[in-house]
Amino acid sequence: MNTEFFKSTLIAGVLPDSDSTRPRKILDFGAAHASTIAHLQRTFWGRLTVLDLISQASEINALLSDDEASEQRATVLEDSFEPCIGQAYDLVLMWDFALHLSDANLNWLNDWLDAMLTYDGVAHGFVCHNATRALAAKRWGIAGPDQLEAESGSAELPYQHLRGALSRGLPDFQIDKSVLMKDGRLEFVIRRRETP
């Protein structure tokens, strides 16, 4: 596996710091990369919950798209999200998860984030900047306060959502900040839309 490092101007701004007056909660949609755990052990006071949804993303997307599979879908989703049911997180690390869901299924992600994030919580992840450029699936981690680590696999991400598709698919959230990365991903931070 090939390992790359990426400068991130956004991750430092969303990670809870050690000066927090209360324990913070982080939810990782990935498999909790060793670098993430090491970084959080040095700097973080709170709880990290790992779902490893990315490894199940193709199955989840297929079940969400299949109207006939409602019973199986309910079981898989309940099992997948069971560790975080009833919790509210300050930060959700989505990584590439949105790029495994079809346009029609992004509304599920909207509902999940609505249920998982605290009122002022944020989510961090990636979408495409250029839909004509295929992106490799990567296993992401936090290498430092302004650096991400990624291990590349051989598979390509199945969907090439641009910023606009993400905004339409997540109507309860707004992109707070976004930055173009060297591999063509758009790194973003989203938060709840302010109600008028």
Image (tube, rainbow, N blue to C red):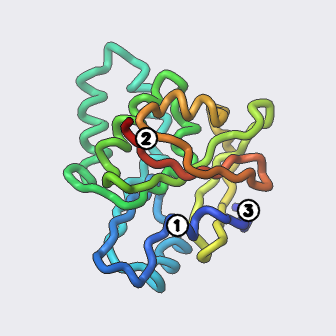
- Dot in front, 2 or 1: 2
Q: Work out whether mark 1 precedes mark 3 in sequence or the reverse, and give the earlier one.
A: 3
Residue that label 3 marks: 2
Secondary structure beneath dot 3 equals strand
Neighbour class for label 1 at 10 Å: few (<14), some, many (≥20)?
some
Left or right relative to 45: residue 9: right
Residue that label 2 marks: 193
Residue that label 1 marks: 33
Secondary structure beneath dot 1 equals loop
Neighbour class for label 2 at 10 Å: few (<14), some, many (≥20)?
few
Neighbour class for label 3 at 10 Å: few (<14), some, many (≥20)?
few
Q: Residue at x 51, y 48 (%)?
A: 190
Q: Work out whether mark 2 precedes mark 1 in sequence or the reverse, and give the earlier one.
A: 1
What's the amino acid at mark 2? Arg
Distance, label 3 to label 2, CA atoms, is 38 Å
Image x and y of residue 78, in percent: 25, 40
Question: Is residue 174 depicted above or below 143 in this figure?
Answer: above
Question: Is residue 76 depicted above or below 29 in this figure?
Answer: above
Q: CB under 8 Å between callouts 2 and 1?
A: no
Left or right relative to 100: residue 19: left
What's the amino acid at mark 1? His
The number of numbered discs placed on residues in the rendered structure image is 3
Observer-nearest residue: 85 or 55? 85
Left or right relative to 40: residue 96: right
Distance, label 1 to label 3, CA atoms, is 14 Å
> What label does residue 91 carry, if any?
none
Q: Residue at x 23, y 49 (%)?
A: 85
Q: CB under 8 Å between callouts 1 and 3?
A: no
Q: CB under 8 Å between callouts 3 and 2?
A: no
Observer-nearest residue: 150 or 179? 179
